Image (cartoon, helix red, strand yellow):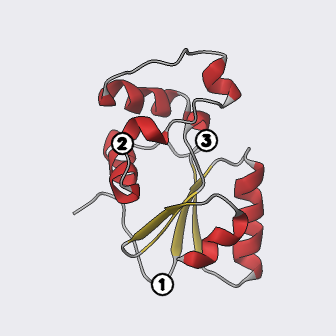
Amino acid sequence: MGEIATSRRQITLFYSSKSIRAKQTLAYAKAEGLVIQEIDILKIKLTGTQIVELADRLKIEVADLINQEHPAYTSHFEHHNFSTGDWIKMIQHNPEIMKQPIAMRGDVTILVETPTDIIKI
């Protein structure tokens, strides 16, 4: 049992309020009348357990949650192979480097690539 509560009745969206894709996704979801629980990762600090759970739900490693092309990553870090704990700390201290938005509904979790992906769940 994970730490992140999910529901079939609403979509939980983890996103950065600075992300254009996230803003478009939220606007699209609201226009479609979808019930969204918004979690802005820049305002609400994710726990290590939540980060691991998001990676597990997406069936990827925590390291794969990092957008190594993001300017906040490239300006502070070089490409490395860190431990899972180190990647978690990097996300917690630099949430903007996490790939997002991530949408969850019930047992389904997706990384939103385009705003219309939100209707896939």
Q: What residue is at 47 percent from the left and 33 percent from the top?
A: 92
Instruction: Name the image quarter holding residue 35.
Output: bottom right
Give the numbered dot on residue 61.
2
In the rendered structure, which amino acid carries the disc numbered 2? Answer: Glu
- Percent coordinates x, y for residue 47 in the rendering: 38, 42
Compared to residue 7, the image places residue 48 above or below, namely above
Compared to residue 70, the image places residue 18 above or below, namely below
Q: CA distance from mark 1 to mark 3?
A: 25 Å
Q: CA distance from mark 2 to mark 1?
A: 28 Å
Q: Which residue is mark 1?
A: 9
Instruction: Name the image quarter holding residue 120.
Output: bottom right
Mark toward the viewer: 2 or 1: 2
Compared to residue 23, the image places residue 42 above or below, namely above
Q: Which residue is mark 3?
A: 42
Q: Is 47 left or right of 44, judged from the image as shown?
A: left
- Percent coordinates x, y for residue 89 in the rendering: 41, 27
Give the camera-side residue of 83 and 7. Answer: 83
